[in-house]
Amino acid sequence: MSKKFASQADLEVKTTTFAQISEHCWAYTAEGDPNTGVIIGDDAVLICDALATPVMAQSLIAEIRKVSDKPIKYVVLSHYHAVRVLGASGFKAAGMQEIIASQGTYEMIVERGAQDMQSEYERFPRLFDAFDSIPGLTWPTQVFKDEMTLWMGKLEVKIMHVGAGHTKGDTVVWVPSEKVLFSGDLVEADAACYTGDAQLEEWPATLDALAALKPEHLVPGRGPALIGPEHVQAGLAYTRDFVTTLLSSAREAVAQGMNLNQAMAHCRKAMDPKFGQVFIYEHCLPFDVTRAVDEAGGIKHPRIWTAERDQEMWHALQTAV
């Protein structure tokens, strides 16, 4: 394993795509980089995940302005991770009035938002174009507990926390009339699940709750938009397989008294053949295994990742098993 994060060598700029997936819903995807969802209602626009910097937000605004001049009134945070939230201020000039987050997401920002900002930037600098343009942490202006409904003219939009998984505060955006779901990182497609702050044991039940909505189209946190029920079901199944294989392997490692290095090797035996080829796998796996070992060992609430802890974990994995 390299002495530097795998992502620090990932310098290739990804091509973004802005594609309409239903009458009111659009997907802004980027070849395995974080996705953003867009809903163009009768009187306003909603963004699901704000990109990583205000400068990056301008590229999305330019795409939206090709198809709509309506104010971009709402920004919904699917969770607290820096790469998803720190671009929110870039939408102010475009009409932003509300930044919406779940109670769990708000609590995570309070607890660890500053540490996460520095940690994520040092891990994966390419994802933070013009990092210096970020004015500080993104704070929600509206916080909900379980569910809230927006009416964008005649279009009903539900913003829901249906359960923990990727983080304790995961939020999805659901457009019932068009059967479109914006899942954030609760669902991935052709990309590794980052589980460094996850509730792995709870994640499958949350996926069941998403499946119960019977979405026909789904915009995942990373990877291509999933168009059609078969592709949606495949994305849900892929994500379930990733997180359950990871946790079951970590439980085996803990039961056998393995140290972190040994646990990494043990998890790789199960994970590599299935997932070794997908986007950001090598970047995610050390953080994934570390969190899975913690959870398997009884640490329910994820430990905070700091830039210093990142480096300690990474360097600890340099030594031979």
Image: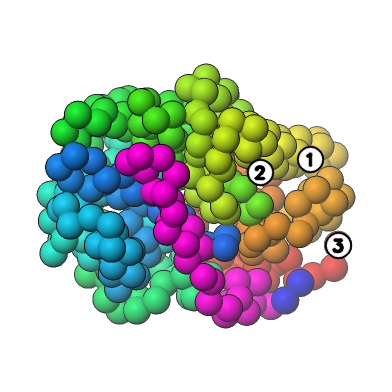
Q: Which residue is drawn at 48% across and 58% down?
A: 29
Look at the image and give the residue range highlighted in magenta. Answer: 3-30
Instruction: Identify residue for label 1.
Output: 249
Q: Where is residue 92 in the image (x, y as percent from the top left)?
A: 15, 61
Label at residue 292: 2
Label at residue 220: none
Does residue 63 appear left or right of residue 296 in this picture? left
Distance between mark 3 and mark 1 Cα atoms:
17 Å
Neighbours of disc 1 within 10 Å: few (<14), some (14-19), many (20+): many
Distance between mark 2 and mark 3 Cα atoms:
18 Å
Residue 237 quadrant: top right
| Type of the residue with mark 2 | Ala
* Residue nearest the viewer, comparing 38 with 270: 38
Q: Residue furthest top?
A: 212
When the figure is inspected, residue 279 is found, relative to residue 172, above or below; the finding is: below
Distance between mark 2 and mark 1 Cα atoms:
9 Å
Instruction: Identify residue for label 3.
Output: 321
Decide which of tag 3 and tag 1 comes sooner along the chain. Answer: 1
Q: Where is residue 143 in the image (x, y as percent from the top left)?
A: 22, 36
| Type of the residue with mark 1 | Ser
Callouts 2 and 1 close, C-beta under 8 Å: yes
Q: Where is residue 251 in the image (x, y as percent from the top left)?
A: 75, 36
